[in-house]
Image (spheres, rainbow, N blue to C red):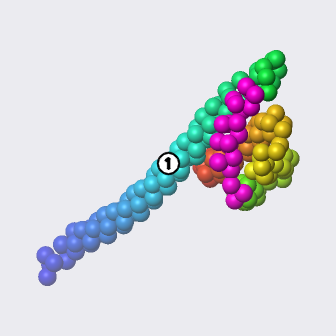
Amino acid sequence: MNEFLKSLPILYSGIFGLLGGLIAAFFAYKSKKTEMKYNAEIKARELLYKTYEQKLKKHNERMETYSGIIGKMQGAINTEESEIIFFKQITPVILNQKKLLKKSSLIEMKNELKKLEIYQENMEYYNDYSKDFIKVISDDGSENTKELFFTIESMLNNESVLVNAILEEKSEKLFSKYLKD
């Protein structure tokens, strides 16, 4: 019995050491789990951001293409070139743009602006865009080609402003949680 009493402090030390080790392992596990969750969330947000970035890149490439065509068309408008040459050059641009337009995309853009709470600050651009958009998709061919061309040019400029505003706001909201001071 005397030996048993002498071994009690060692036994207690072992039990407390084991409990301490278990508690430390538990908190290390929780910490690692939180870290892994945080890293996974950051990675998911980065991937989503890359998607936004790719959308913006595609949009900007499309706008760059149209800008080049619009620049050539403006040159044709401002020179002595005949209406027929201008019409032949601009008709594919107009037809291509009309194929891309759907009324639902106009509504989707407005809903996206409202969802992101940036509709009010972009209302003027949106109203101009929607007016031009409706004019372009409603054209039955009787519209003056030059006027329709300028309408498309205005529509594309406003679309570019709106798309950039949407993607910028989405990106900011995506990482705002991590960028707060």
Which quadrant of the structure image shows residue 156?
Answer: top right
Q: Foreground residue, 43 or 56?
A: 56
Spot occupied by residue 138 in the image (x, y as percentages of width and height): 78, 52
Image-based side of 92 in relation to 11, left or right = right
- The answer to whether any part of residue 142 appears in the image is yes
Magenta stretch contains residue 94: yes
Quadrant location of the N terminus in the rendered image: bottom left
Location of mark 1 (residue): 47
- Compared with 30, 92 (above or below) is above
Q: Residue at x 62, y 37 (%)?
A: 62
- Compared with 138, 75 (above or below) is above
Q: Residue furthest bottom?
A: 1
Image-based side of 178 in relation to 40, left or right = right
Image-based side of 130 in relation to 22, left or right = right
- Compared with 125, 109 (above or below) is below
Residue interval drawn in magenta: 84-105
Spot occupied by residue 108 in the image (x, y as percentages of width and height): 70, 58
Q: Residue at x 65, y 48 (%)?
A: 99
- The answer to whether any part of residue 118 appears in the image is no
Q: Foreground residue, 25 or 57?
A: 57
What kind of secondary structure does the magenta stretch mostly adopt? helix
Task: Tell me the amino acid under the disc marked 1.
Answer: Leu
Q: Residue at x 82, y 33 (%)?
A: 146
Q: Residue at x 67, y 33 (%)?
A: 66
Q: Residues within 10 Å of mark 1 (few under 14, many from 20)?
A: few
Q: Of helix, strand and loop, which one carries label 1?
A: helix
Which quadrant of the structure image shows residue 12?
Answer: bottom left
Magenta stretch contains residue 144: no
Q: Foreground residue, 125 or 172?
A: 125
Q: How many marks?
A: 1
Spot occupied by residue 3 in the image (x, y as percentages of width and height): 13, 76
Spot occupied by residue 107 in the image (x, y as percentages of width and height): 73, 59
